[in-house]
Amino acid sequence: MKLYEKPETARKTAAYFSASHGGIEHSIAREPKLFFNSLVYNLLFEEGGLVIPDIFFFNCEPLIRHVASAGGKKWPLLGRAIGEGLSIPAFRLPKIETFNTALTEIGVNKILGMEFEQYTKYSTTPRAFAGILDSFASGSRAQYMTWPEDMGSRFASFVRRVFENPLADSATEKHIDMSNALEGWRDTCLIEAQRLTAAKGGTGIRRAEIWNALGALRV
C-alpha cells in the first residue's frame, strides 16, 4: 500500500516528534500517559504535522504499546493521525513507500535498537506490526517523507562540528570539566563510527555506530 507523498511546501512546517525517539523511550516508558499526552499536545499545537523517522516506529516501546494495545479493534490515536496525514513517517530511501518495505530495509542494513521483547509482551511481531502501521495509511490523506539525500554524511559533518566546538560561551565549570574528560576519545570515536558505518554499506556516520564505538572503548 503506497502512502501519499507530502507536498514539499508542507514538509518545511512539520515538527519532529521527539517523544518517539528510541534514545529517550526509557525515560517515558514507565509512565504510559507521557507518550499519549505528548502525542495529543503536539497534534493539537503543531500546525504542520509530526514527523517520525521509520526506525522509531519499530524501536520505541511507548509507541509500540500505544498501537498494539488497541488490539486491532479500533485505530489508536497515532493510527488516525497517520491516516489523516497529521503524523508523517520519514523513510530512509526513495524506494520505500510502506512500513513493510521499511522494515525489510532496516533489517538489510542491520540497524540496531529493535528489542523483540517489546513485541512479545503485546503478542505481536515486527512484521505483523508493520502490517498494522500500513493499514493506517489507507486513509486518503496519508502522507510520507523521504530522508534528505546522503543523510549519513550530513550527520557526520554536524557531529564533527559539535565535537570540535563542544562548548558554548555560557558553559559552566562543570560542563568544561566534562568536555575535558571526553577529549581523549572524541576523534577516536568518530573515526571508528565512520568505519563501522562503511562496513555496513552506509555513508558518513550512523548515530547507532557512535554508541557502538563508545561501547567498545575502554574509558
Image (tube, rainbow, N blue to C red):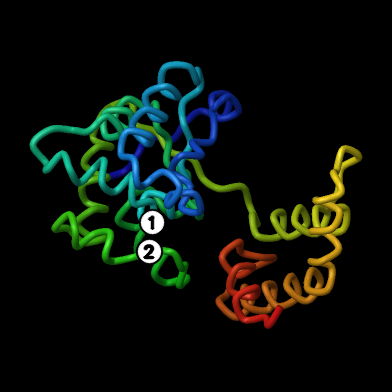
Q: Which mark is residue 114?
A: 2
Residue 163 image offset from top left, x and y in percent: 81, 58
Of 107 and 213, nearer the camera is 213
Residue 96 image offset from top left, x and y in percent: 41, 53
For badge 1, the amino acid type reads Asn
Residue at 61 percent of width and 47 percent of height: 148
Kindly give the residue lying farthest to the front in the view shown: 174
Q: Earlier in the sequence, mark 1 or mark 2?
A: 1
Mark 2 is surrounded, within 10 Å at the Cα level, by few (under 14), some (14 to 19) or many (20 or more) other residues, namely some
Residue 102 image offset from top left, x and y in percent: 38, 56
Residue at 45 percent of width and 54 percent of height: 95
Q: Tag 1's secondary structure?
A: helix
The relative height of residue 204 versus residue 8 in the rendered view (above or below) is below
- Pointer 1 and pointer 2: residues touching (CB < 8 Å)? yes
Q: Which residue is mark 1?
A: 59
Q: Which mark is residue 139?
A: none
The relative height of residue 65 versus residue 76 in the rendered view (above or below) is below
Does residue 146 appear to the left or right of 104 in the view shown? right
Which image quarter: residue 134?
A: top left
